[in-house]
Image: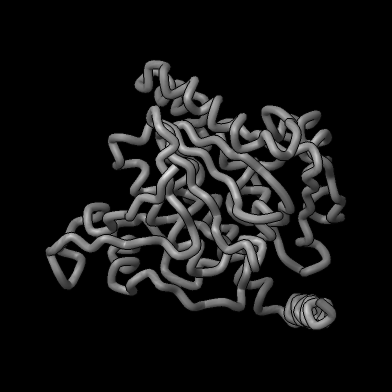
Amino acid sequence: MHCTIVTIWSLVPRVKFSSSKPRPYKPTKLQYQNAGDGVFVITLNDPKRLNCMSLNLVQEVTLLVEHAKRDERCKIIVWTGAGRAFSAGGNFTDTSSTVPEEVFEGYIQEGLAVQPPDVSLAGTTREMIKFPKISISAINGTTIGGGINLGLLWQDLAFVGEDVTFRYPFGELGLVPELGSSVLLPRVVGLTRAKQLMQYGSEFTAQQALQWGLCTEVVPSKEVLPKAVEAAKKMAKMPQFALRESKRLLQKDLVAAIDSITQEELETLRNCIASPETRKAMMALMMKTSKNSSKL
C-alpha cells in the first residue's frame, strides 16, 4: 500500500478559501493508503500517544471522511491503528493542529464540522453516520472510550484481534457518552448492559464484544488487518449502489436523528467538563499518567 496526498481544496467550495488553487494536504496523524481493488485503508497514526483523539487527529478524520466520500477510486474504507493501540480515546489537552484554520472553517460553514471546542466529536460523528460507502474496522490493540465508538459503533463491519480489550472510563472521569454512543451503544447491546459499560466502566474482551453483537469476527491479532482488507475487497466486487442503498435503509432512522443526538451530547459534555467534580477527576488522571510516564 502507498500513502495518498489528500486534495483538501476539492472537498468544499473553493470560494471559502483564500486561494482558488488546489491545496494538497498530507495528513500528519493519519495515513490514507490504496490497498487496491477499490479499497482504501485509513490508519490512525500517532502510535507514541496510542492514537488518542487529539484535535489534529480528529480534524484530519473529518477531512479524510469527506475525501473518501468524493474519491471515485474508493469503494470501501478500512480503519486501523498504528502500533499497539487502535485508539486510547479522547485527548482534551492537545489543541494544536496542522490543518489550516481557513480550511477547517470552510468545513464548518458547509455543515461538515462543528465550531470548536467540539469535545464530543459531534461533527465527525454526523459525517461518519451519514457516510454512504461501506466502512470496516480492523481493531488491533488497546481501545478505550471514544476509540470504541470509532472502531465498533461507527462501522458496518468490525474485525477484532483476539487479545484486544475495551473499556469506557467515563464514569470515573465524570464524563458522559459521546460520538453518538448514547444511542448507538444501547441500540446494539441493550440498555442495561450499556449502562454497565458506560457508568460502571467494566472492561470487556474481544469475545464479549462478539457475543454482544459489537463486532463481526474475532481473529488472531496478526490477521486483523489482512482479514478486514479481504472482506473489503470481497464487498468492493459487489454492486455498490445496492450496498449503499441497503446501508441507507438499515440506518435511516439513525441518520434522521443523529444531528439532535450529537448536539445534546456536545452540550452535556461541555457542562460536565466545566463542573468541579469532573475537573478534579480528570486532573487526578493526568497526574497519575504523568507519574507512570516518568517511570518509563
Asked whether residue 277 is in view, the answer is no
Name the residue at the front extreme. 1
Quarter containing the C terminus: bottom right
Residue in view at x 37 percent, y 43 percent: 68
Compared with residue 287, is residue 61 higher up or lower down, i.e. above or below? above
Residue in view at x 62 percent, y 70 percent: 91
Towards the viewer: 91 or 5: 5
Quarter containing the N terminus: top left
- The percent coordinates of residue 295 (x first, y second) are 84, 80
Where on the picture, by quarter, is residue 105? bottom left
Residue in view at x 46 percent, y 21 percent: 246
Residue in view at x 36 percent, y 50 percent: 4
Towards the viewer: 262 or 56: 56
Asked whether residue 44 is in view, the answer is yes
Towards the viewer: 154 or 94: 94
User: Could you tell me how many numbered marks the image carries?
Assistant: 0
Compared with residue 117, is residue 228 higher up or lower down, i.e. above or below? above
Towards the viewer: 266 or 69: 69
- Residue 192 falls left or right of residue 273: right
- Residue 251 falls left or right of residue 144: left
- The percent coordinates of residue 235 (x first, y second) are 47, 22
- The percent coordinates of residue 145 (x first, y second) are 70, 56
Q: Please name the colour scheme applied to the rendered image.
A: one colour
